[in-house]
Amino acid sequence: MKTEHLLIIRFSALGDVAMTVPVIYSLAHQYPDVRITILSKPSFRLLFENIAPNVGFMGADIKNDYKGIKGLNRLYRRLTAKKFTAVADFHSIIRSNYLRMRFNMSRYKVAHIDKHRQGKRLLTSSTNKILEQQPTAFQNYIDVLAKLGYPVKLDFTSIFPPEGGNLRLLSDSIGEKKKFQQWIGIAPFAAHQQKIYPIPMMEKVISLITKKHPSCRIFLFGKGERENKVFSEWIEKYSQCINASSILKSFSKELILMSHLDVMLSMDSGNMHLASLVNIPVVSIWGATHPYAGFMGWNQREENIIQADLPCRPCSIYGNKNCLRGDLACLISITPQLVTDKIEEILSNK
């Protein structure tokens, strides 16, 4: 009997790829005899390394190493050598569409994601807006697998054991977590300005937290010139702040640290999804975007979402469009005290 070998294609940003993990984990454990290969950006390999013995990974840089039609044809030949029996396109962009077409022409069993574009257009419309929950990315991925004959029930909790990742693998700069000490993560940046809580207001949040919890540790997540500049200024003012991304210099180590946080504060960003994968409560701030678009973090609670009730929201699915009002009221109207109160609520419950 021929072994079933499923190819799953998903490139794009970190958050989008992270959202496949709960689905692929559930698939792998419910179909242990099916080989599963993930095709994605090489840097995302570690998200899938320890999911299950039947899960493998193929890295492909489709913007450089496999650029253009010739590059995609080379990638297709590389893929066909693996002798897949089915192909799940979790992305459905021009490049994955081309690969899917090649597989279809060779009579492979192929299915692709439904992005529910009409519902999202109505959700972000400036007139006659329909504020209605769209199917989540998790559900969209499940639907693709069902079309291929792999119905899945999501049963994912964390990429780590219940006690979290191994803290001993981290830098001495992180140190041990003291009894009753609060560890708080803050990821204040996102890919687009329309999703970023104003930096002076975020600093006020830090000020309020440190006054309430002087012995807490605040781990800052984010990489880049702008991030480092802001983080350096905060670290000088607040001894509780640590630039975790700079100290750890490793995606995998950041995940270990996240698994020991009491709470993460983030935007609608990749770090929201990473914290969700390690079963940590996330307080998420939403500006131009909206959870109704289907991109809320795995297993996160609606009551931990912070967002302004404005008739123009959401104006964008991904946050990449200019503010229609020009004042980013969706973010500015959220007070630092409101954010701090939500964090305090989670800390009190723990």
Image (tube, helix red, strand yellow):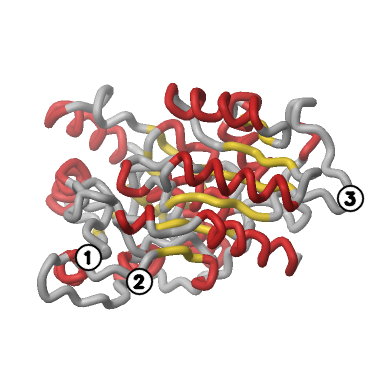
Seen from the viewer's position, the closer of residues 140 and 347 is 347
Q: Is residue 28 above or below residue 38?
A: below
Q: Nearer the viewer, mark 2 or mark 3?
A: 3
Q: Residue at 53% across / 45% down in the picture?
A: 48
Q: Residue at 32% across / 72% down in the picture?
A: 135
Q: CA distance from mark 1 to mark 2?
A: 36 Å
Seen from the viewer's position, the closer of residues 28 and 14 is 14
Q: Residue at 32% across / 37% down in the picture?
A: 81
What's the residue type where badge 1 is placed?
A: Cys
Judge from the rendering whether residue 216 lies leftward or rightward of residue 226; answer left or right. right
| Residue 121 picture location, percent across and down | 15, 65
Q: Where is the N terminus found, in terms of image quarters?
A: bottom left
Element carrying mark 3 = loop
Q: Is residue 333 visible?
A: yes
Q: Residue at 58% across / 64% down in the picture?
A: 156
Tally of numbered tags: 3
Badge 2 or badge 3: first in the primary sequence: 2
As drawn, the label of residue 312 is: 1
As drawn, the label of residue 146 is: 2
Q: Is residue 87 visible?
A: no
Q: Which residue is mark 3?
A: 179
Judge from the rendering whether residue 204 lies leftward or rightward of residue 175; answer left or right. left
